[in-house]
Amino acid sequence: MLSLSRRHLTRNARSVLQTVKGQYRGHATPARLLDDLIQRGFVHHVTRPEILGAALESKRHVAYVGIDPTAGSLHIGHLIPLMCLLHFQLRGHGAIPLLGGATGRVGDPSGRLTERQLADIKQVSDNVDSLTQGIRSFFKRASAYAESRGMNVEGLIMEPAVTSNLQWHENINLLDFLRTVGVHARVNTMLNRESVKARLTSQRGLSFTEFTYQLLQAYDFYHLHKNHECSIQIGGSDQWGNILAGIELIGRLEDPNSEDIEAKAFGLTTPLLTTASGEKFGKSAGNAVWLDANLTSVFDFYQYFIRVDDADVEKYLKLFTLLDHDEIASIMKAHITQPEKRIAQKRLAAEVTYIVHSDTGVSRAITLTKLLFESDYNGLTAQQITSALEGDPRLVTVNETELFDSPIMKLAAKYRLVASTSASRNLVQARGLYVNNQTVPEPQFKVTRSQLIDERVAILRAGKDKLLVLAAKEDV
């Protein structure tokens, strides 16, 4: 539920903005929020930039981002609008993440050549519930991340007022909607929206349901503006027409003679992000990279950013971290001198993983990366290793008697590192089986306590890619 009090939204703006002045201690950040967003690459289009830029520095505003509940989890494509919203919060402004509990039942035609299948109503409702928790988790961890980067977030990053637009749309009947919204909509203007024109020229055309979607989204902006003093809508570049429809509706429904008519409502769109190779950002081998660790493991999430192309890494550091511009420039300078070390990618992966999965997630991902891809285990502790593999089938707990009395060759076969004992024996003879990065010298080789990491952990590797971790537990 949306729980924003008018007193909360209209608290003395000057005191809030004064608080913000000290939060970027040590950060070479542009003085104006809009300038910072532009430099970081968040802005594709923006309405009346000079007026908006000044308005953001003079009083507290509230911005909202719409999120389509087509799935039950956020993916990394959502990081762009959510990070943009986070910057607003860090500068003392309010934030409303709005879930399309109503509009998700219809389907947004923007950026699509074919009509969406009408969504199952219960599935949309379930997705809204799951996404609500995901958004709250994001802002909670983003607050901890911002504080760890030297920002004073006290009183600035509050739990966002996540809501669903079903809250107001379900109580509006068709006649009331036509009288309130439809009477102000001009069909020729609606037909000129890019999302509409693209579909009208397609073979399957555009349904009336999808055609009216822009009116529903326009009403969302009006409702939030009227009831919660929301003055800024943020969306992807394909939402530009829908955002303009909302601004126009606000202008028509409110007093056009008002002194601050030019500062009533603004729109800002973020760019459609693609990789240097032209692929849509957020996909890994054709699959979405989710923020939910149950759908995309923390390790795989971290590795997505480790694999970022050199041509993209600076852009992503600006968008997906709170590192200041000078620090990013320093990171890139070091990266360019030794690109093979992937200095920039490692920093990017650590920063984004911290935001989404906390510092614990970063530690686990880095540890597992060392286990899988590096040959030097120095510095790793047994606790780090077992924590990194918690819930992973590659971590097996065994009794000390079994670990010390059984040949490594047999343990590798028993716990499925290799297919069979004979395959394990062949691997030993080919010098391709390792324990704690030491070659297993002969088939009957047994590990001793002193050879374990912290006298507890044995890391078995078959070739370069297959890994098994045996953690000793005392015999009962």
Image (cartoon, helix red, strand yellow):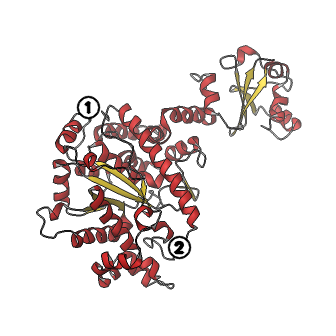
Spot occupied by residue 150 in the image (x, y as percentages of width and height)? 32, 31
Spot occupied by residue 263 in the image (x, y as percentages of width and height)? 18, 60
Dividing the picture into quadrants, the one containing residue 471 is top right
Residue type, numbered disc 1: Gly
In this picture, is 451 found above or below 431?
above
Q: Quadrant of the C terminus?
A: top right
Closer to the eye: label 2 or 1: 2
Residue at the spot of label 2: 116
Residue type, numbered disc 2: Arg
Say which residue appears at 27% left-offset and 45% top-offset: 8
Disc 2 or 1, which lies upstream in sequence? 1
Q: Nearer the viewer, residue 324 or 161?
A: 161
In this picture, is 214 found above or below 207?
above
In this picture, is 223 found above or below 114?
above
Number of marks in the image? 2
Q: Disc 2 on helix, strand or loop? A: loop
Furthest toward the right, the residue is: 422
Instruction: Check residue 26 in the rendering and tell me which mark sits there, or answer none.
Output: 1
